[in-house]
Each structure stands twice: as C-alpha cells, then as structure tokens.
Amino acid sequence: MAPHSATPPAPTAPRRTAVPGITPPVPAAHRAPTASRAAAVSRSAAAAAAWRERDRLPRYWFANRLVLTLSGQRPVHTLLGHALPAAYDQLIELAPRAPLRPAGERATAPLVRRCGEYQPRHGVIEAFARITSGDRLTALAFRLELGADARWRCAAIDLGPLA
C-alpha cells in the first residue's frame, strides 16, 4: 500500500464528450496562420516600413513638425534649432492662431498626405505639402536650406491666405 500523500492531486480539465458530426472549435492560439492573413500582415508591415522611410526625408520630416506646431499640438520652440531667424519669426506670428487646428469637436488631427519638392540648386529644397483634417484640405509651402553643418533648416513658410 502506498503512503498517503499530504498534497491533493492536481485539478484536471473537465472532459468533453464528442458529439458525432461536430468538430469542436480550435482556440485562436492553436490555429495555423492562413495564407491570406499572412499576406495581409506582410502588406501592412511593408506599408508601415515605407511610411517610416518616407518620414525620414527632410521635406516630410519638416512638414510633419510644421503641422504639429501650426495645429497647436507642439510649442513653437520645438523648431528653434530647425528654422532660420526669418522663418522662426513667421512661426512665432502664425502659431498662436493655430491655422491648421482641426475645425469642430469631432474633426481629426491634421495629417500630411503628400509632400513634393523642387530643388532649384544644390542645398535648397522648395517643398509643398497637402494637409488634411477631416474633409478640409490645406496647402503648406516651405523652403529648406542646407547649412554648413550639413543640417537642413527651414528658411520660409507660406500657408497662403488664411481665413
């Protein structure tokens, strides 16, 4: 006879009886990924990588920072080292009015949809950006100049006529 143990036996899961013709559901953790799900994940990962790469370009980087500042989401001084004095003065004048702030309570935050550039000469980028906020579309133009320290700085900003 075996000695009596002081620890109770481990609990077991309740047994399920199989019903003929019905297969029990397989938990999500045990399902094999389908080809379509794997392809969708692959496409979204590729799209996210493309967006990250795009945002590293100087024109997109500045467009995103300008949108954050001109919509009131970031203070002007975050662009202090990234703007030449004339452009920084323009930002100081524009920022309190927050011309890119979303209109209405339920409007979405502004987003840079597309940003193009023209390079009139080496070290100068004249860029334009299409900014969306809900159903509103706004244009933003700015000029970037390459400094002696190999850093891009904003030299001018234009939002066009403001309402």
Image: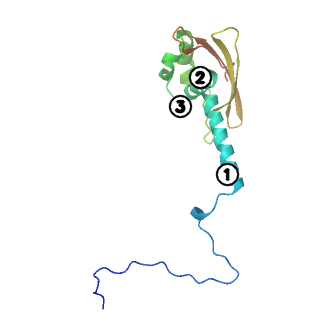
Q: Earlier in the sequence, mark 3 or mark 1?
A: 1
Label 1 sits on a secondary structure element that is: helix
Nearer to me, 38 or 116: 38
Q: Residue furthest bottom?
A: 1
Residue type, label 1: Ala
| Image quadrant containing the C terminus | top right
Distance from disc 3 to disc 2, alpha carbons, whole Å, reads 15 Å
Residue type, label 2: Phe
Label 2 sits on a secondary structure element that is: helix
Quarter of the rendering containing residue 150: top right
Q: Is residue 136 left or right of residue 144?
A: right
Q: Earlier in the sequence, mark 3 or mark 2?
A: 2
Quarter of the rendering containing residue 25: bottom right
Model colouring: rainbow
| Label placed on residue 38 | 1
Quarter of the rendering containing residue 83: top right
Q: Position of residue 95 (x, y in %)?
A: 55, 22
Nearer to me, 6 or 110: 6
Find disc 3 in the rendering and name its residue: 73
